Image: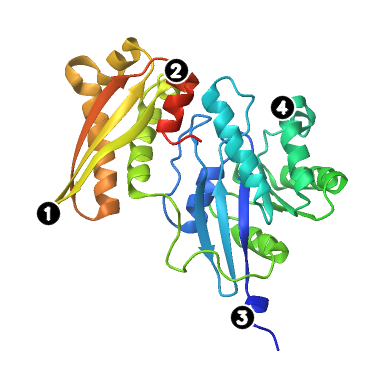
Amino acid sequence: MMSNEDKFKAGLVPIIGRPNVGKSTLINSLTGSKLSIVTPKAQTTRRRILGVVNGDNYQIVFADTPGVIDPAYELHNRMMKQVKKALSDADVILFMTEPKDSLTVWEEKTLKTYVDLMQETGMPVVLMINKIDTISKEQVEALRLQWEQWLKSKFSESKVVTGSALTGEGLDQLLDAIVSFLPYSYPLFPPDQITDITERLWVAEIIREKIFLHYRQEVPYSTEVIVTDWQDKEHITVIKAEIIVERDSQKKILIGKSGSAIKKIGIEARKEIEQMLGKKVYLELFVKVRRDWRERNDYLKYLGYE
């Protein structure tokens, strides 16, 4: 007679891919909640964020990880450590590509390191070709065959699926492919928990998303956000947050003329936070300069980048 554990499948599935391939959009679509911030800019995701998807006989714990890059700062090194840690804990690996992705770049030095790490885990790999709504059916099929051949040469257990994280096309097939490889196990999280992200971190990420959407060039990449105070009152939540930048010139740009730019960020972030919390929010933003914070081990640790 089979136990409940024998009937149920569960496991950790890190999502690996290059920046802007659609990892955060996918985890938001699958969970039905905005867990990861999404912008058109690369390298928006800096932290591993878990998103839990429950089915009748399975639980998939997706890990949205930073896009694989060649590190230029100590911050990048720590982001890539999160990718490597997620791979080492994986039960199944979800490898995401898009039509613009090339097989050859995954054979070059930086990205090949991560292919090697995926191979070392010995875990099954499900490859999703994302953004198929942007190309023809003939192109989709050609890409599928190309990646399928590449996967078979690298991994003993693998499947290729095609779909769109944005439109939802192919996501049922993606879940089926992942579940087919999951180990039998009890659920890893309670059925009503969809993420491990705290409200404070979620608020900080929403503020950082607005900065990525409204500022150009280096400013968003030189910025970090940390919630410094949170007070729940009867009819309102009072939140104070610091926006960290590296230079005085960046602080000036963030604040804008007579505070107009930072005010716009605050208004947009507050509206979204109020929707999530279901109550009125008073959001106060402060901009502080911490020179070269992306290279400072002590400050990166303070910000939660282990």
Quadrant location, the N terminus: bottom right
Q: How is the image coloured?
A: rainbow
Q: Residue at x 79, y 31 (%)?
A: 107
- Residue 4 is labelled as 3
Task: Say which residue label 2 marks.
Answer: 218
Question: Residue flagged by tag 1: what amino acid is it?
Answer: His
User: Tag 4 or tag 1, which sits nearer the N-term?
Assistant: 4
- Label 2: few (<14), some (14–19) or many (≥20) C-alpha neighbours in 10 Å: few
In the picture, measured across the screen, residue 152 lies left or right of residue 11, that is right
Which of labels 2 and 4 is toward the front? 4
Of the numbered discs 3 and 1, the one sitting upstream in the chain is 3
Q: Position of residue 38 (x, y in %)?
A: 45, 39
Q: Earlier in the sequence, mark 4 or mark 3?
A: 3
Which is in the foreground here, disc 4 or disc 3?
Answer: 3
Residue depicted at x 37% and y 23%: 215
Residue type pointed to by label 4 = Thr
The reply to whether the C-beta atoms of the residues labelled 2 and 3 are less than 8 Å apart is no
- Does residue 159 appear to the left or right of 133 in the view shown? right
**Which amino acid lies under the numbered mark 2 shown in the image of this protein?**
Glu
Question: Can you tell which quarter of the image residue 207 is in?
Answer: top left
Whole-number angstrom distance, CA of label 4 to CA of label 3: 43 Å
Mark 2 or mark 1: name the one nearer the start of the chain. 2
Q: Which mark is residue 110?
A: 4
Residue at image mark 1? 235
Q: Pointers 1 and 4 in contact (CB under 8 A)?
A: no
Q: Real-space Cα distance between discs 1 and 4?
A: 51 Å
- Lower sequence index among marks 2 and 3: 3
Location of residue 95 in the rendering, given as x and y in whole percent from the top left corner: 68, 45
Mark 4 Cα-neighbour bin, 10 Å: few <14, some 14–19, many ≥20: some
Instruction: Indicate which disc, 2 or 4, sits on the residue closer to the N terminus.
Output: 4
